[in-house]
Image (spheres, rainbow, N blue to C red):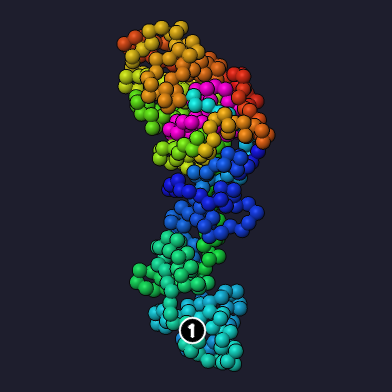
Amino acid sequence: MASPRPLSEQEIHGRRGRPITDRDATDISRVEELSYELKVQEVMTADVRVASPDMPVSEVLEILRTNRISGVPVLENEQLQGVISIEDVVRAMRDGELSAPVSEYMTRKLVTVLNYDPIVKALQAFTESRLGRLVVVDENGRLAGMITKGDITRGVLLALQRDYKEEELRRYRASHLFEDIVSDRTTLVLRYNIKAQDFIRGGYASSHIKRALLRLGADPQIARRCGIAVYEAEMNLIIHTNHGGVLKTEVEPHRITMSTVDDGPGIPNIEQVLQAGYSTASEQVREMGFGAGMGLVNIKRCVDKMEIESAVGKGTRLTMRIHIPSQNSSAQKD
Amino acid sequence: MNLMKIIKIADGVLLTPDINTDIEIRGGYGADLMSDVLAFSQPECVLLTGLTNPQVVRTAQMADFRAIVFIRGKKPQAETLSLALQEGIPLISSPYGMFELSARLHKAGLPSFESNGVS
């Protein structure tokens, strides 16, 4: 995606209060992505009106007027001959030649795009040709449809709306999980395997847990508390264990239970690690902003109940629990 | 305070031009210790930090920060940048040091969001 580059004064101080320039438009990331994802055939008009070369221009004028369009492709024996647009019709009117055949006034120079091209190709063709509409052809060069800048705008807006609706739908479905599934005790369990020393992916699991809780309809404050606790616990697995461990989150309507289990090295003195500021972390870990001896202290503050069991040479099990008040959210009711 | 104003006060360079910066920031928090950030910050503020590794973005995400400003002209690692783009958290680089930047933002009316340890 975008790499850091020096920005102009204007870019730093913002776009508000002035029209969006082409440069700005290219900075809008999702739209940019969509211009590569969306294919011409997804946004084009497939059911197009056509003209034939020997049809009088007056008939084209009627087609344009009744369909409220600005141009049609000209076909002879299913072969593309050109395009006749409103400008061409105006030229014929100026000459008083509305009864002349289309072939005399149509534009023969065709600018086409392929139906399976990304819409960015069409945008480039619009910019280069300065045309308002392009003919879409299939791989055999046959007419597949027409595309205008308006079709592209509409297609992109619909896709953006779809993105938004998908997230809404995910949230809706997830938040009804506990209501839709009836059992004496419903529990959703999320498990993640955490690798030791994998600092780059550190927080990946916690990030997914937090998002899942929000989708399930958890109160943002509760999701934040869980996120922080589970993130500290995940970093502990990465920083301190021999072989990593398993991070588990169990979601129930009335409580969230998070736990980590590892197979060593184990903690010799639990009292000691619970003291604020006690740390055995390496210099490398400290340089990353961790290892200040605050992890467990922090976890304890975020959760309602924390338990830690450990045996040297065997491993450690950390259990954290947050209770959900029943009025907290409709999805989390008992 | 709008993030655009913060960028201006910080003489900042926006490193994530794809992410919307027209957002409201309720306060500021400065730290190089991520555990401190997780322990004492409040949501919806801007994080000022000298650290540039991906964990800064994860920390910001967990603690509900809205933006991150790297002090003393620091530039983030590539992984940090791509994670920020993925999570939609704006990254800004400011030439000022932590004290100077905090003072400038506070003077302009951005409240301190360092809580006293009670979350």
Answer left or right for A64 relative to A124.
right
Up-down: is A82 above or below A331? below
Q: Chain of mark 1?
A: A
Answer left or right for B113 relative to A240.
right
Is residue A25 visible in the rendered image? The answer is: yes
| Highlighted range, magenta | B34-63
Up-down: is A241 above or below A206? above
Up-down: is A38 above or below B17? below
Residue B41 among those drawn in magenta: yes
Answer left or right for A50 relative to A241.
right
Dot 1 crowding, Cα within 10 Å, few <14, some 14–19, many 20+: many
Question: Who is closer to the viewer here, A320 or A127?
Answer: A127
Residue that appears at 42% across and 22% down: A286
Residue that appears at 49% across and 44% down: B15
Residue that appears at 43% across and 33% down: B53
The image shows residue A254 at horizontal and vertical percentages of 57, 22
SS label for mark 1: loop
The image shows residue A197 at horizontal and vertical percentages of 35, 26
Snapshot quadrant of residue A270? top left
Question: Who is closer to the viewer here, B37 or A43?
Answer: B37
Question: Who is closer to the viewer here, A326 or A108?
Answer: A108
Q: Quadrant of the C terminus of chain A?
A: top right
Residue that appears at 53% across and 26% down: B31
The image shows residue B16 at horizontal and vertical percentages of 50, 44
Residue A6 among those drawn in magenta: no
Residue identified by numbered label 1: A106
Kind of residue indicated by mark 1: Met
The image shows residue A78 at horizontal and vertical percentages of 40, 79
Question: Who is closer to the viewer here, A137 or A315?
Answer: A315
Is residue A215 visible in the rendered image? The answer is: no
